[in-house]
Amino acid sequence: MAGRWRIAVTGIGLVTPLGLTAIENVAQVLGGQTGIRIRPDSEGATAAAVPPTFDISTILRHPKNVKLLSRPVQMALKSVREALGESGLPESRIASDRTGVYVASGQTGLEYDEFFKGLTLAWEGGREQDYKYLGGMPSKFIDRYFSLRTLSNAGVGAISTEFGARGPSNNYVQGETAAAVAIYNASLDLEEKRCDAAIVCAYESLLVPSTFIAFRKMGLLSGGGLSPVYTPFATGRPGMVLGEGACAFILERLDDARERGATILAEIDGVGLASQIADEEGLTATPDDLRSAIQGANAGDNGGDAEYLFARGLGAEADDLAEGRALAEILSPGLTVSALKGQTGYLGAATAAVELAIGLLCARRGVVPAIRGLDHPDPRIPLRFVRETPTPLPDPAVAGLFLSSTFGGQVAAIAARAIPFADMNRHEQI
């Protein structure tokens, strides 16, 4: 799409390892806190980024549906509830069939441990390991709703049903860039008048045995999965920590949001998407890929008028080095660079949305948060990282760039700008 988009963000909801609300997330990030912990309930004391517990049934319009909802979908619903409450959209005159739902989710799949209890009973006493014995009593140990909970598009149905959104809808499973794709398509539908409001939600949980084992076998986990230290771009960085979370945005056309008197939190200027073929040194984008994505976000050849950037900052040495060198090659010198995974953990399909939300909400306060634990940046990466304390912005409304990429070679850049507080004394505002 040519020209600058005029898409307003009127609501944001967050459920992350840092907290269960947007306000709590921003306070934790700016305070230098992390949501990464050692899970005492896990075998081998695994390091993970886990949100606080909550009871979704107390806020559902249809509480009986809880049995159909996986934990990540419950996080998604909670984040949407917060975003809608902030936006005032339920009280607006926007018809339900003009409200779209755009969801970014993980490719969840079936977890084999769902069958363990049933199989143990079915094959007891040295019985032949054949699935024909899984009927009768053993089958009662298998939750009848497990297949519904593991669908990657379960969130679309749950959000549409719970909040009565009957407009355009779709689900995207493009890994870490899925949220950028969802925002892109929601913005297009708004611009082209296919809907008048859009619920965009991204969610995933990587805290399942098969995912953990896969990342550990690739040698990507911090301390083999046992260390809670996660320091992107640092010398001697130990690797990644997996987590789970969700983030929701309410998007509207800027003029419409102004007309109904909504509080505008931010504007989406554009989204750029690119793809690449992975090389032997890692799957982080090359300079040409990043340049293409940034240009596609209407941000110009070298970031345009962006004053700050949130890098992918995966925390794996080869990927950090490739990304850092590529950014140094294409960005304006001195651009302020931050990264959040050292505080949120790696959240899969929720990552790009969570980082966009937290980054914009911090910018509303006039600062870019520091990269936690970056005491000794990798000297091979010539970027201006935010370290130790948040960096003030010359104007909270300046543009920012938010990057994401996948292990499959997809790249995304979101250009957005925060709208500063009308009254900085209203501490309850996000």
Image (cartoon, rainbow, N blue to C red):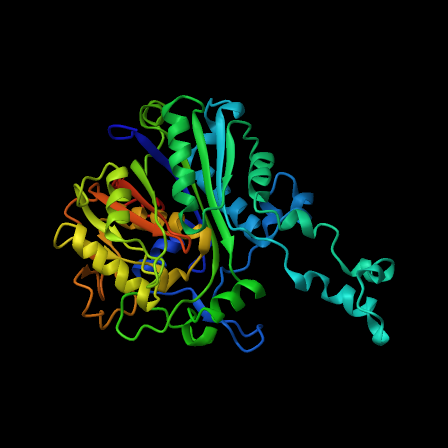
Residue lying at 38% horizontally and 36% vertically, measured from the top left: 184
Out of 182 and 267, give the one closest to the viewer: 182
Residue lying at 29% horizontally and 50% vertically, measured from the top left: 362
The image shows residue 424 at horizontal and vertical percentages of: 25, 45
The image shows residue 51 at horizontal and vertical percentages of: 49, 59
For this orientation, the residue located farthest to the right is 136
Visible residue check, residue 378: yes
Judged left or right of residue 138, residue 399 is left
The image shows residue 339 at horizontal and vertical percentages of: 30, 58
Judged left or right of residue 190, residue 116 is right
Q: Quadrant of residue 36?
A: bottom left
Judged left or right of residue 126, residue 259 is left
Visible residue check, residue 422: no
Residue lying at 58% horizontally and 66% vertically, measured from the top left: 209
Judged left or right of residue 30, residue 62 is right
- Please state the total of marks drawn on the protein image: 0
Q: Quadrant of residue 267?
A: top left
The image shows residue 160 at horizontal and vertical percentages of: 57, 34
Q: Residue 93, relative to residue 399: is it above or below?
A: above
Residue lying at 55% horizontally and 59% vertically, measured from the top left: 53
**Image quadrant where one finds the C terminus:** top left
Q: Residue 137, relative to residue 412: is it above or below?
A: below
**Image quadrant where one finds the N terminus:** top left
